[in-house]
Amino acid sequence: MAVSMLSAAEKRRPWILLAPTLAALVLLMLVPIGIMLVYSFYKFQTAGVETPDLNLGNWHEFFSDSYYHGFLWKTARISAITALLCAVMGYPPAYFIAMTSFRHKWLLLLLLIVPFWISFTIRTFSWVHILGEKGVINASLMGLGLISEPIPMLYTEGSVIMGMIHFLLPYMVLNIYVSLDGIDRNLISAARSLGCTNWQAFKEVTLPLSLPGLGAGLLLSFVLAAGSYVTPQILGGRKDSLFGNLIFDTIMKELNWPMGTTLSVVLLVLLGIVSIIYSRYMGLSTITKGLSR
Amino acid sequence: MKMSSTRRLERLKEAYGNGAIDRRKFLGLTAAAAASMGVMTNWSRNALAAASEVRFDGWGGVVQEAIDKYAFQPYTAKTGRKVVQGTFDDENVVITKLKAATPGQDFQVIHSSGVEYYKKYIDNGWVSEINEANIPNMANVMTAMIEPFRKMTPKLSCVPYDYGTTGIAYNTKVISEAEAKEKGANLLVDKKYAGKIGAYGDMVTRVWYASLQTGQDPNNAQDMEAVWAKVREARDMTKKYWSSGAELMDLMAKEEIVVTEAWSGRIAALQQQGAPVAYHDPKGSYAWMEDMLILKGSPMAECEELINFMLDPATAIAVAEGQNYPPSLDPKKVKLTDKIAKLPAFDPTGEMTSLTFANPDYWSSHSDEWTKQWDRISKGA
């Protein structure tokens, strides 16, 4: 009897420990999402005023208006480009940090985190002073006499992608690093002793084993880029808005909450689908594995 | 019909919120009621808290710095009551926050953008009823500025405070005064400056200037197709839509743009900093007024006292000179300074007939549709 009671208590214990987190998740995430979903069926009356006359008008507008589809496509395209560039730029430093015999490896990892000590908005604004017509690059090139007119770099799609890479690269490097650091070095030595060149050992052993980290980095970068609002707002021109800006303007400028929440749910579903696809092929556990190390 | 205690207290709160009873009486009555019920009501706690501070939300930057320096700091020194300040770069942001907050508690006094926005507060049921007897300095405010608000709500929820224009600012190293005056509103769609033009990313300003550029009355445009075509034409020449006074000043100071619509006061501030910038109000330039709006549920007596202090001629003149926008004080009743007389948009007659304000009926009837259309065009549609 005592054994079975203890067993029941043991069974309850994880739930008791999880209860605060679950309560927070339900109250702070699921309930707000539920409210958003309900709001998407409300009727917009005038700026800032809506009525709970449940209808499918907002959803019909979304599905029938190509304006919204264009933004979804552009957001997906720019997010994918950003994530891929982050992977290309993030792999070498992650590899270097993981494989270096430098005694103070922690210092290199610390350098990755240093940018987070500065406000994200300030970091984004710093690009204005670098890419602007009077910015560091143009001023230097003109000072050296290499160009006579400033190169238009700011307020372009390129400056938006650059701003997002600046923000997302540390996430990518850390994810790849965790994956590379977990590889048993004996496997690489074995490949080398069996006749592989360095490149072959990397291609056949290191790269495949680091794919979960690379995949997790790609997923995180894509999701964060797709939800980005501040970077396109500050560094983008008139045609560089993303879906996040569309949601912001619908809610904050048009004061049309029902349509704004409809678009928010759409973005949520889109990113959910991407995560499901990732989970199907890579497994979401690869992300938690990295975090649990 | 028997009235419940809750209903009685709600009515009491409403009377206090509307200024029908003062705070002392309200607190006394609620405290008596609370003592009888053995509880302290939520709103009496708020009223007690409000006794020591008032919440104000404004446009930030040099404008709010002037208000803080010349109005709030002296007010706090005099009364001991603190003014807790917040800022916004777009008043719609405040409206969005208000929908998720409790007007009167989280937000109390708003530096609001005239009658166009006044209607939004009315539509949402957030307007209070000011007891004008508590603001004796209102007697000095121009009647021409008060009347548009009174037409919308006979019992005012706000008091006009300043006014200005959205004219054209240009870099004097690139554009001459003669060229600016000759081209007027069309300077903003001059192909010669394509890629170096800035613009305020706001529907009313965009439609207003497109109306001028197509030769139409901004308060009664008949050919909207032509207006939208002009908005698109201007968009394709625009380097950046700015969204705050600080951003406008930054773009002009760094010479990222050489011409833009601009708020007169911000350009005056830039000129004082030595930037090579001039300001021109073309014919039909967009004039606007701003008001101090008290939200429903706010501690009325304290808010009214603050606004009365802000309207005191010495305070209002100091603020006007600091923020570079003329005050709402009637020049026929209050002697204003030479510096104010030289500010753009200043109307020495006190009648406001020389300025073109937005017709609230015309603009509010099209606001939702045009905001959506503008939002799309601004994103390339």
Image (cartoon, coloured by chain):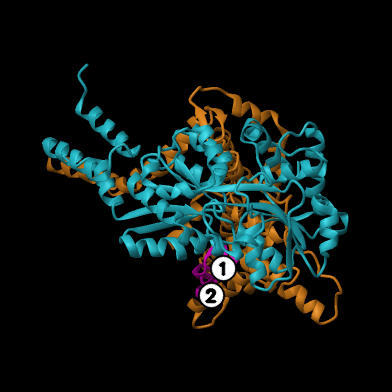
Q: Quick one: quadrant of the N terminus of chain A?
A: top left
- Kind of residue indicated by mark 1: Leu
Q: Quick one: quadrant of the C terminus of chain A?
A: bottom left
Evaluate whether residue A176 shows in this view: no
Residue drawn at point x = 20 percent, y = 39 percent: B30
Colour that chain A carries in the picture: orange
Q: Name the residue carrying label 1.
A: A187
Circle 2 packing at 10 Å, graded few (<14), some (14-19), many (20+), is few
Residue A113 on the magenta span: yes
Residue B214 marker: none
Evaluate whether residue A241 shows in this view: yes
Q: What SS does tag 2 mark?
A: helix
Chief secondary structure of the magenta span? helix
Specify the chain shown as cyan: B
Q: Where is residue A124 in the image (x, y as percent from the top left)?
A: 61, 64
Q: What SS does tag 1 mark?
A: helix
Residue A111 marker: 2
Q: Position of residue B304 (x, y in %)?
A: 38, 48
Answer with the quarter of the image where residue B270 lies: bottom right
| Residue at mark 1 to residue at mark 2: CA–CA distance | 29 Å
The magenta stretch is: A109-123
Task: Give above or below for A19 relative to B12.
Answer: below
